[in-house]
Image (cartoon, rainbow, N blue to C red):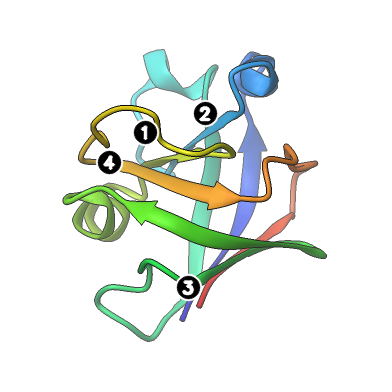
Amino acid sequence: MYTSFVKEVGSLALAFEEDKVVILFGPEAPQELRDVSIIHEVNQEDNDAPIKNGGELQIDDQIYKVTAVGTSANKNLKELGHISIYFSEPNEEILPGAVFVSPSKYPKLDKNSKIVFK
């Protein structure tokens, strides 16, 4: 399981709702990426690879099924706190740091929102 909490919502981070993507970065994110990112901080990490096909993503009370995981997503999450979560189905090659989830309902994210991969 991987649990983190939103510490900061970039001023442009939720502008990607039409594209149905959320960009997560850890607290060490460079300043030039903070405006477009959801900055989160790990609270609990019990697994080296918490994101897996068929797994679950929970954002507050919203539950999603993980449908595809890029080859570097778990490594990027562990090292940088960075992944891009797509609330849609992949229609092309999956980018290495991408995670796709279903349903395609865009989440409501606020400061202190809880993010859990299980």
Q: Which residue is found at the position 27% from the left and 51% from the top?
A: 73
Residue 37's tag is: 2
Separation of residues labelled 2 and 1 (CA atoms)? 9 Å
Q: Position of residue 60 (x, y in %)?
A: 77, 62
Secondary element at image label 2: loop
Q: Amino acid type of disc 4?
A: Gly
Residue 29's tag is: 1
Q: Which residue is found at the position 41% from the left and 20% from the top?
A: 33
Nearest the camera: 86 or 31? 86
Asked if the residues shown at circle 1 and circle 4 are in contact, with their CB atoms under 8 angstroms apart, the answer is no
Q: Amino acid type of disc 1?
A: Ala
Separation of residues labelled 3 and 2 (CA atoms)? 23 Å
Q: Amino acid type of disc 3?
A: Gly
Q: Earlier in the sequence, mark 1 or mark 4?
A: 1
Separation of residues labelled 1 and 3 (CA atoms)? 26 Å
Asked if the residues shown at circle 2 and circle 1 are in contact, with their CB atoms under 8 angstroms apart, the answer is yes
Separation of residues labelled 2 and 4 (CA atoms)? 14 Å
Q: Position of residue 93 (x, y in %)?
A: 23, 32
Q: Earlier in the sequence, mark 1 or mark 3?
A: 1
Horizontal side, residue 4 vs residue 105: left or right: left
Q: Earlier in the sequence, mark 4 or mark 3?
A: 3
Rendered view: 35 above or below 105: above
Rate crowding at label 1 as few (under 14), some (14 to 19) or many (20 or more) other CA atoms within 10 Å. some
Residue 55's tag is: 3
Dividing the picture into quadrants, the one containing residue 17 is top right
Separation of residues labelled 1 and 4 (CA atoms)? 15 Å
